């Protein structure tokens, strides 16, 4: 077991500014390291951090790198480099969070550099996994496993043939946070990675079948899971050509239902024609908790609470580890009641709040949305302009980064200052998730109102 060598930054390289699009984890060229060179790539493994830029001598060389992103390798001359890491703030300015620091690259070495820790806990660190850049036989894979999941205790990691009996398998590596396995040499082929608590038998994570190619090193990093499922980790698997997030095969999908149909009665929700409702007596303006269901094709029935079907066998497909809100929208009176599915992102970011606006009000028409300090929209440009209600493609702003503070949200008729909703006073905190849903008045029509979700939801 190897402790990752601690550094004071997350990168060791210099590139021209034109190369700032290489943080895409997809470099089709083989990595060739000459005797006077070294290869470097960067991993963003801080779950509560925003996207970051990485700079050398104030020149941005990695731009807008996201959590669980991995750069392609860059082959550089040996020598000294000065690097800094800047967090991107909601106003698109940035602040240096690591460095600038001078570092050295040694000949014929590879460096996988991880930003790890937590912004909120002020525990940001940078670690490097370094190993010789040597020729590997085409039928052999050199595997390195890194425990980069902050606040996840020591774990046992098993790398076995798919479906092997875990009780009969030997532990491949026991790792604490900030440690790596060192070199694990295996034949190329399909494997299954399973993780338990150290000394335990309950599987916390299961990769399913995972292909590991020969002829190149493969780095497997355990990172904090920020998606669906109870597992504490997701794996980020990187070889010379690509990187991918590998979710727990048992993660399922997280789904909540939002009742946004103003003239519809209280409803029960059934999944896959089950005898018992998954959600009962959901009233207009309410949202269920997230439910974990299988990642699969599903049939959803919506019944009047305790009564007959309102919607029958609506097809909804969910993906592994994804999170969704299913909105009941439209109007019973207009015979256009339906379901609309939005993908959610519930990862919290310690340097910003995240505000989502959803337009689910048929009566409101096209709208503008203003985010103001005092509720006065005169002379201001809307934050979101000319948003239409579209039952077939329900509008969501997605998670918009917003600085902590007190705001007043105002919704107007598009192109005018005619106020339809608000001012709605909201307090945004760093790390917060906030969703405002525009809906018709209770029973239908105007004046439009709102459903408040996530950290804006009323405490019952």
Image (spheres, rainbow, N blue to C red):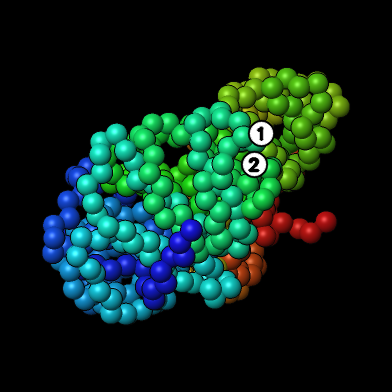
**Which residue is painted at 31% across and 55% down in the image?**
71
Q: Position of residue 449 (x, y in %)?
A: 67, 52
Residue topped by disc 2: 203
Does dot 1 land on a helix, a strand or a loop? Answer: strand
Q: Residues within 10 Å of mark 2 (few under 14, many from 20)?
A: some
Q: How many marks?
A: 2
- Quarter of the figure with the C terminus: bottom right
**Which residue is painted at 36% across and 79% down in the image?**
99
Q: Nearer the viewer, residue 392 or 34?
A: 34
Residue topped by disc 1: 293
Q: Is residue 183 left or right of residue 285?
A: left
Q: Position of residue 33 (x, y in %)?
A: 17, 55
Q: Is residue 454 left or right of residue 141?
A: right
Res. 51 image quadrant: bottom left
Q: Position of residue 274 (x, y in %)?
A: 76, 22
Q: CA distance from mark 1 to mark 2?
A: 19 Å
Q: Is residue 3 left or right of residue 71?
A: right
**Which residue is painted at 46% across and 71% down in the image?**
125
Answer above or below: position of 102 versus 91.
Answer: below
Residue 313 makes an appearance in the image: yes
Answer above or below: position of 417 versus 204.
Answer: below
Q: Nearer the viewer, residue 192 or 3?
A: 3
Does dot 2 land on a helix, a strand or a loop? Answer: strand
């Amino acid at each position: 077991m190897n402790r990752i060598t601690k550094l004071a930054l997350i990168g060791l390289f210099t590139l021209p500014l034109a190369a700032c699009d290489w943080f895409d984890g997809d470099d089709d060229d083989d990595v060739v390291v000459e005797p006077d060179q070294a290869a470097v790539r960067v991993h963003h493994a801080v779950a509560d951090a925003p996207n970051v830029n990485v700079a050398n001598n104030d020149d941005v060389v990695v731009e807008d790198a996201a959590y669980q992103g991995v750069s392609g390798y860059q082959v550089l001359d040996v020598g000294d480099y000065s690097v800094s890491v800047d967090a991107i703030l909601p106003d698109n300015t940035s602040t240096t969070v690591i460095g600038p620091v001078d570092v050295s690259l040694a000949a014929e070495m590879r460096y996988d550099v991880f930003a790890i820790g937590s912004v909120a806990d002020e525990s940001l660190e940078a670690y490097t996994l370094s190993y010789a850049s040597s020729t590997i036989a085409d039928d052999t894979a050199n595997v390195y496993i890194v425990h980069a999941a902050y606040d996840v205790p020591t774990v046992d990691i098993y790398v076995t043939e798919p479906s092997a009996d875990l009780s009969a398998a030997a532990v491949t590596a026991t790792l604490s946070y900030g440690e790596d396995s060192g070199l694990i040499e295996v034949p190329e082929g399909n494997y299954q990675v399973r993780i338990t608590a150290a000394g335990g038998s309950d599987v916390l994570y299961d990769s399913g079948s995972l292909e590991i190619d020969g002829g190149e090193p493969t780095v497997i990093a355990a990172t904090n899971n920020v998606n669906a499922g109870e597992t504490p980790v997701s794996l980020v698997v990187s070889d010379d050509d690509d990187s991918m997030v590998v979710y727990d095969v048992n993660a399922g999908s997280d789904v909540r239902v939002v009742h946004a149909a103003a003239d519809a009665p209280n409803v029960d929700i059934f999944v896959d024609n089950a005898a018992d409702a998954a959600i009962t007596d959901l009233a207009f303006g309410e949202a269920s908790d997230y439910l974990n269901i299988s990642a699969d094709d599903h049939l959803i029935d919506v019944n009047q609470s305790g009564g007959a079907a309102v919607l029958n066998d609506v097809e909804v497909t969910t993906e592994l580890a994804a999170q969704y809100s299913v909105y009941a929208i439209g109007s019973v009176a207009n015979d256009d009641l339906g379901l609309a599915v939005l993908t959610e992102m519930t990862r919290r970011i310690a340097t910003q709040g995240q505000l989502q606006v959803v337009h689910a009000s048929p009566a409101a028409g096209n709208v503008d949305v203003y985010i103001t300090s005092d509720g006065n929209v005169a002379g201001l440009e809307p934050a979101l302009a000319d948003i239409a209600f579209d039952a077939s493609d329900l509008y969501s702003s997605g998670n918009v980064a917003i600085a902590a503070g007190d705001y007043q949200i105002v919704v107007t008729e598009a192109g005018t200052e005619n106020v339809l909703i608000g001012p709605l006073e909201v307090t945004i905190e760093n790390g917060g998730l906030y969703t405002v849903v525009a809906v018709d008045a209770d029973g239908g029509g105007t004046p439009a109102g709102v459903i408040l979700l996530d950290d804006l939801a009323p405490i019952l």
